[in-house]
Image (spheres, rainbow, N blue to C red):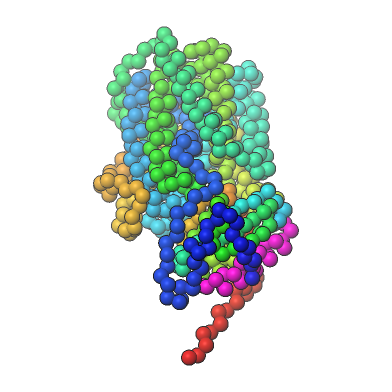
Amino acid sequence: MPEHPPAPAGSAPRAGSPLHDASAGSAPSPAPALALRRSIGTATATATSAGLAFAAIDYLGVVSVLTYAAGAAASLAIAVGGVLVLLVSAIFAELNGLYPTAAGIRLYLGRAVGNRTALIVTFTYMTTVVMVIAADAFIIGSAIRYVLGESPALAYLWIAALLGMATTANLLGVRLAGWVQTTVTYSVLAGTGVMSVVAVVHHGRGFPHPVDLFGKGAVSGVQAVAFALFLYAAFEWVTTTSEEARTPPVITRALFVAPVLIWVVASLFALGLAHLVPFARFHGSAYPQLLVGQAALGTVGELWMLALTVLTALNTFNGGFLVASRFLYAAAREGNLPRAFARLNLRAVPWLAVSALSVLSAAVAAVVFATDQWLLLVAVGATIEAGIYAFASVCLVVLRRREARPRPFRLRLGRPLAVVGIGVFGLLFVATGFSDPKDAHRFSVAPMAVIAVLAVLSSVYVLVAVPRLRAAAAARAAAARPRRRPPRSAPAAP
Amino acid sequence: MADWDELGEALADYTISCNGNDRLRKMQRDWSRTLHFVCSDTGSMFSMLVERGEIVGTPEGHVGTPDIVVTTDSETFCDMFWGDLNPVQKYLRGEITVKGSQEDVMRLDAISYVIWPDA
């Protein structure tokens, strides 16, 4: 039997925690509300949400928006995207209230559309993490190379070095303290915002056609809004921290406040970029933020923006590796990936999951480096994100019907709004999926082709490999040892 | 539903398995936490005190301020502590709910994985 030491002073009184046998007829009592020793509040949760969304690739995301909505109209597209994202905030707030767990969208989807579809969608979704890590490594490596005046060929050395450092830190179990993450996020947002304001008030090209959203083609405004969604992408991952939130409203507040912060900063940056840098110059650049800094404040501005770019890496590499490697670990433990992905090193880190992510990210970064197709990554990411938001809307519609439980947050007119969400995000999914990220006047199947390949690979894996893995796991478990729990003794005859 | 005797027996076995596993002790050497458990069906509560990876107590009732709170039914707790079920599968189905940091939740699962890799 386990030991039962007396409760220390200040602990919960034993009389208040009756350990009773319900078979004796007592009614179950609800679990009491408990405060955790370490929990996160609204400021930290908001920083987590904004930090997950605002990566270095967001600077290129703004370039993509400007490709479809010229000049000041880009900020209108970002605002419209922000309004749509607030609908996403409300949908995730309700779903998170129903299932406040790190399993997040995997669980909502599983309950709404079944386990197989949930797995296919979440495996495809997770590829965005690899793309963001790869893109950020590429952008930061290219920016460092540019500022140091090195040959373009040396950029990949910086990329490899950055990924190597991030992998080593993760394998050693190094984690950024919560306050460091919060400080980094607010510094990056504030720093970008301040530089953008300096750029906006600088003498420049002006802000023509602020409401001409469709100036670059019949559907360019729709595509601009779709790319604007990408600027907010991943803000919803804050729901994976709901188990450590002080109270349920903390996550709800973060889901609504973080997009507003991103809207302000991204809009200012779009205005500053369009105001000071010619389109032809920033459209072909992997580091538009440095061009804004240089144009606004010379070398000081360039170094300022380089420092902010490097800072974003802390959040991306820390958060990205952590979210994706723990997802792979859980998938392996659940029997949906080979067991090797759950193997832990002596620092309790799933080393194969972290290493595989690192190798994949390095490979994707190498392809981007060799082909200069970084805007394609933005298009693929934006398309997947629009698709995920459409799926989240489906979840709300289905779970409104299936789950009558009260939730801490309930979206008013939830069902009709979610139906609208399915339509709007479905349309944006198609709009970005067939966009040419380099030319607003042309269409391209490239983004949708990449997603189709990812979805087919994911589907084949889930439909063919996963059942085999599960069968093997069940056989292994049955052969390894019998049930350990002793059988319950039969009650004495009356 | 499992009563305290059954839970206690399961906890005792779990404690011996954890504390006797050298690899686990080394892996969790920097992990000192207070865990609270709540049986959703019976209302029973108990705690687990972990010091540098060693389980030093599993008292009845809630002791101290928790780092992690785990809630599920008493049968699931028993099966989990005996190593007869994979807690991740229950967790991902929403049948086990946890309050705590993601890192602590993974560390808690890692215990089961290291001592019963085939569960």
Vertical position of residue A278 compared to residue A360: above or below: above
Task: Return the residue nearer the eye: A252 or A417.
Answer: A252
Which residue is most to the bottom?
A: A494
Is residue B58 something one can see in this rendering? no
Task: Where is residue A157? Give x, y as percent.
Answer: 66, 29
Q: Nearer the viewer, residue B9 or A418?
A: B9
Quadrant position of residue A90: top left
Residue B11 among those drawn in magenta = yes
| Image quadrant where residue A330 sits | bottom right
Above or below for A107 versus A219: below
- Residue A100 x/y as whole percent: 44, 51
Most common secondary structure along the magenta stretch: helix
Tell me the quarter of the image containing the N terminus of chain A. bottom right
Judge left or right: residue A393 versus residue A194.
left
Q: Is residue A115 magenta?
A: no
Q: Residue furthest right?
A: B22
Residue A453 or residue B41, whichever sits in front = B41
Does residue A21 show up? yes
Residue stretch rendered in magenta on the structure: B1-23
* Residue shown at the point (38%, 31%) measured from the top left: A260
Image-based side of A154 in relation to A330, left or right: right
**Residue ID at (57%, 33%):** A180
- For the image, the number of numbered tags is 0
Kindly indicate the quadrant of the structure image that contains residue A79: top left
Question: Is A147 on the left or on the right of B69, as rendered?
Answer: right
| Residue drawn at 48 percent across, 27 percent down | A189
**In the rendered view, does B17 fall on the left or right side of A327?**
right
Q: Residue at position x 42%, y 65% from top?
A: A29
